[in-house]
Image (cartoon, rainbow, N blue to C red):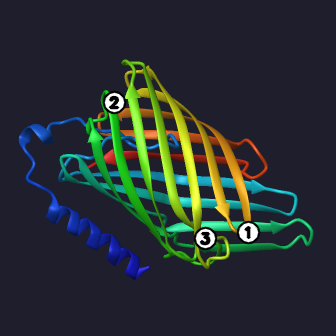
Amino acid sequence: MSRVRGLLLAVCAGAAAWAAPVSAQQRDDDRFCPNRPSLGSSGCTTLPGQVQVEMSGVDWQLDNNPDERVDTTRFADTLARIGVGPKTEVQVGWSPQVIARTRDKARGTISRVAGISDLTLAVRQNITHSDGHGLSTAIQPFVTLPTGRGDISEGTWSAGAVVPVVYEVNDTWSLGFTGQAAAQADEDRHGRHFDASGIVEVGYTVSSNVTAFGDFVLERDNDPMQHVTMAQLAGSLAWQPTKRTQLDVLAVAGLNHDTPDLQVAFGGAFVF
């Protein structure tokens, strides 16, 4: 735990040292475009010198199959987005507490593993419209490090890249696509395999401070033990009581037997 905290502090300190001086105009900018609560990613970046924190207070997922039922709950699942340039941000993603509960249906036994999650580090480089307006695009390479333990951790590193493309059609509607390709850790933890996904998103502005999202996710996972295609449908709602604060809720349903059945998350985002 202490090593992980040290790494988080080192990243934040390095980002602050790298950040360019911020003009008064930039400081007054109301840029605020969280990734959450939808499953896709935004194309905008956090302003230099600012830190945007996105967090799920509770994130629960159910994977129920004929052999076993797995309930995974994440508490305070956090993504910190640190602005280090006009179009560049550093990201740190981590959960301080994850509980995985597995019930073997044949034996009736229950096992439980709890601990910290793996750590994800990323850099988002905006390509067009870093404020998130118009056609906003970016590229985001990332690496996941095995800081967790047991079934909570992937057991080895993974790496890949995310490419978000978001278009504001007008003041009411937005369309987005998030593509991802990764060298994903094998289930047996002894190597990596190709994994790719695409997320199609529709956003609708309900009012001046409420936005609804709908997502369709398709993922191909070529794990050596079993090649699977997963599909999900998600709906989410975000409420912004202030220009730099958000509260949100997300619900996700699996569409085939290779996909976790259900996910529900409550959380929010803020800038400081």
In the image, taking residue 220 as reference, residue 90 lies left or right, namely left
Q: CA distance from mark 3 to mark 1?
A: 19 Å
- Amino acid found under the numbered disc labelled 3: Ile
* Residue occupied by mark 3: 152
Which dot, 3 or 1, sits closer to the camera? 1
- In percent of width and height, residue 208 lies at 37, 22
**Quick one: SS at disc 2?**
strand
Element marked by disc 3:
helix
The three-letter amino acid code for the residue at tag 1 is: Met
Q: Say which element carries label 1.
A: loop
The amino acid pointed to by label 2 is Leu
Where is residue 173? Give x, y as percent.
44, 21
Q: Earlier in the sequence, mark 1 or mark 2?
A: 2
User: Which residue matches tag 2?
Assistant: 135
Rate crowding at label 3 as few (under 14), some (14 to 19) or many (20 or more) other CA atoms within 10 Å: many
Between label 2 and label 3, give the one nearer the viewer: 2
Residue 151: image location, x then y, percent: 65, 73
Kindly identify which residue carries mark 1.
225
Query: Distance from label 1 to label 2 (Cα)?
Result: 40 Å
Residue located at (88% from left, 65% from top): 105
- Figure check: 246 above or below 10: above
Tell me the quadrant of the picture where the N terminus can be found: bottom left
